[in-house]
Image (spheres, rainbow, N blue to C red):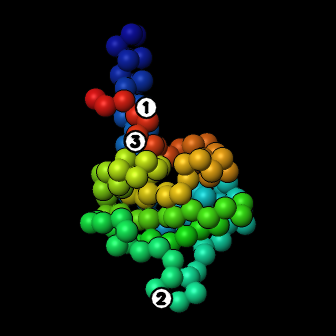
Amino acid sequence: MKKFSFLFLSMILAISCSQKERNFTLLEISELVRKGDPEVKTVLGKDMDAGISCKTYGPGCLSARRMMVRKVDMGVVEFENPEQARVVAKKIDQYYLGNWLFDDVVNEPVLEDLALHILKARRPALEKEN
């Protein structure tokens, strides 16, 4: 019975860990953010040169946009894979979930609440090294 309990617990942990390290679509991320703020809006730049750009985030960046959550702006950046998002999140001390980086979140209570409790995002700078 102990072996079965251990195996079951291991499977649950493996599934929950892999859930965080998968690629999410923009629609999935938008739906998760909407759980924290049904009125979330994508903020458009005044022209093509305004707003945020993948140039800021480096290799692997696929798209970058701003979202307004409870009247607070955050960057939402898509990467090719979770490892690229994690590396940049660690470098700039921000949060990530799967292949998405959430920028300008640290020290914004509304956004940190969203990142931690709704998105279940991770902040690599606070995690222990293996």
Q: Where is residue 32 in the image (x, y as percent from the top left)?
A: 58, 56
Q: Position of residue 3 (x, y in %)?
A: 34, 13
Q: Taking the image as drawn, is residue 31 in sight?
A: no
Precedes in sequence: disc 3 or disc 2: 2
Q: Which mark is residue 84?
A: none
Distance Cα–Cα, label 3 vs label 2: 32 Å
Distance Cα–Cα, label 3 vs label 1: 22 Å
Question: Mark 3 belongs to which amino acid?
Answer: Pro
Mark 1 element type: helix
115 to the left or right of 125: right
Q: Quadrant of residue 80?
A: bottom left
Residue lying furthest top in this view?
2
Question: Mark 2 belongs to which amino acid?
Answer: Met
Q: Do the residues labelled 3 and 1 touch (CB within 8 Å)?
A: no
44 to the left or right of 96: right
Precedes in sequence: disc 3 or disc 1: 1
Which residue position is annotated with label 1?
Answer: 12
Distance Cα–Cα, label 2 vs label 1: 45 Å
Q: Residue 124 carries which label?
A: 3
Q: Taking the image as drawn, is residue 77 in sight?
A: yes
Which residue position is annotated with label 2?
Answer: 48
The residue located at (40%, 24%) in the rendering is 8
- Pointer 3: residues within 10 angstroms few (<14), some, or many (20+)? some
Precedes in sequence: disc 2 or disc 1: 1
